[in-house]
Amino acid sequence: MTKFVFVTGGVVSSLGKGIASASLAAILESRGLKVTLIKLDPYINVDPGTMSPFQHGEVFVTDDGAETDLDLGHYERFIETRMKKTNNFTTGRIYQSVLEKERRGDYLGKTVQVIPHVTNEIQEYIKRGAGVGTDDAVDVAIAEIGGTVGDIESLPFLEAVRQLSLKLGPNNAAFVHLTYVPFIAAAGELKTKPTQHTVQKLREIGIQPDALLCRADRAIPDDERAKISLFTNVPEWGVISMWDVDTIYKVPRMLHEQGLDGLICDKLRLNTPPTSLKRWDALVYETEHPQGEVTIAMVGKYVDLSDSYKSVNEALRHAGMQNHVRVKIDHVDSETITPEGVASLGRYDAILVPGGFGQRGVEGKISTARYAREHKIPYLGICLGMQVATIEYARHVAGLEGANSTEFDPDCKHPVIALINEWKDADGSIQTRSASSDLGGTMRLGAQSSDVEPGTLAHSIYGDVVTERHRHRYEANKNYLDQLRTAGLVISALTQREHLTEIVELPQAVHPWYIGVQFHPEFKSTPWNGHPLFNAFIKAAVEHQKQRLQAH
């Protein structure tokens, strides 16, 4: 039977529920248990696909084509189980499902209410995410509830998991509450009051946490832990410190050494072998003992909010570990890059242009791609980064003056990037869409495979076939491919059916390492192996640094 751990958060958001949940899952997995994670998001958007990166941060994409919360990225990077559409749902998705049932007449004309109809639907979605009743059923499902206890938005979720824990019975469900213990510098002490209040809120709605994870900038002293225990009715061994660390890979050991996994296994009556955290210790060692450092310029639009590039940042760090170097990332605002000032990028070991949408800052990205191409600096373009490299090449090498994407200039003279109106989905169905269609639900989504041209840089990285996850709306216009090829651009991978461009590159005789990919490789990077594309990119950065130092 599948057991459940419900993770809630209190006082403020962004405490790191995702990391805490993923770390707990990693420790339980190291005990030989089959674990999955589910994220419940309390907003009304059906999915985060059209949400602003400023508000939501990154949208993570799964193999089966779900646009999900960024926490699913942490889940995939921390445990072996792959995330699916069923591992993340929003309030919007729940209400959409309930209303569809009501319209069909599934409720037989009853008044549809939050309790029991909405809460029952939430429970069904949680069970579905855990694979209950299927061959994919797990030993433990960790359900992370977004939002903050006490807020109106997440109340139906909290009520649903309270009901579910009651139905499951006391040894089949556990509650872990993450809370904030602030240090007030003026008073020179930690304050436990916010934690007391947030647990009080939980208990008011009938949930008694089994463990408290206390987020603070330092370890919580024993006397404060004792105080928290008395006020919250949580045994002292269940009051666990989560202090700030310099790498997230230290969190699993931090939680294990304070007995969190033992507590959860006791509560859920799970008899397992002891925890082995050797692989985590090896990661921490690699992080703390690099043999060099490279600096990457990430020229993007959302530089003030690093969450919008969460997976790219992580993928670069993973690749650094594989190449035994520390990767320092400078986030450069593409709006500040002008043709005159672009030379400031010359001091970097490599340049990366990530995805993004909308016209703002695009010309800066085009100038960046040109500079990297002309000065032979290793360049990786992802999604829009590939598109700007194509536009730049069309304008300045292929002689297609005024080349652009129809996303930025619908009436441009040479639309080398344009909207596709028909494509084949991951499940084989034909999808059609036009410029007037709903923006919700991106066009090309999820994992798709393409053949890779032998003898190319892409082939040396991926081999014969590349399978990566997509999330985009605009494509390289196949009517221009021959002109671009004639001008020297290598189209090294095309989709098998529509012949859509997946990878462009420059011949290595012209440029040591210059590649643009339409997909999002960062979603498949793990700390254990990195990702072949990022590993190769950081290796090229190391080489470029060596050559630069030799030249000086």
Image (cartoon, helix red, strand yellow):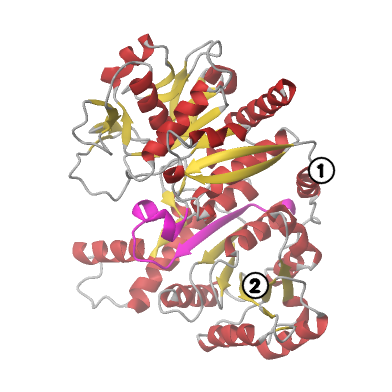
- Dot 1 crowding, Cα within 10 Å, few <14, some 14–19, many 20+: few
The residue that label 2 is drawn on is 171
Q: Is residue 122 left or right of residue 190?
A: left
Residue visible at 74% across and 54% down in the picture: 31
Residue visible at 78% across and 77% down in the picture: 237
Which amino acid type is shown beneath numbered disc 1?
A: His
Q: SS of the residue at dot 2? A: loop
Callout in the foreground (1, 2): 1
Magenta range: 30-57
Q: Is residue 8 left or right of residue 53?
A: right
Check residue 289 in the rendering and tell me which mark sits there, or answer none: 1
Which amino acid type is shown beneath numbered disc 2?
A: Asn
Q: CA distance from mark 1 to mark 2?
A: 43 Å
Where in the figure is residue 69, as x and y percent of width and height? 47, 55
**Residue 139 among magenta residues:** no
Where in the figure is residue 376, as x and y percent of width and height? 56, 22
User: Between residues 186 and 462, which one lies in front from this camera angle?
Assistant: 186
Where in the figure is residue 9, as x and y percent of width and height? 56, 73
* Residue at the extreme front: 340
| Residue 32 visible, this angle | no
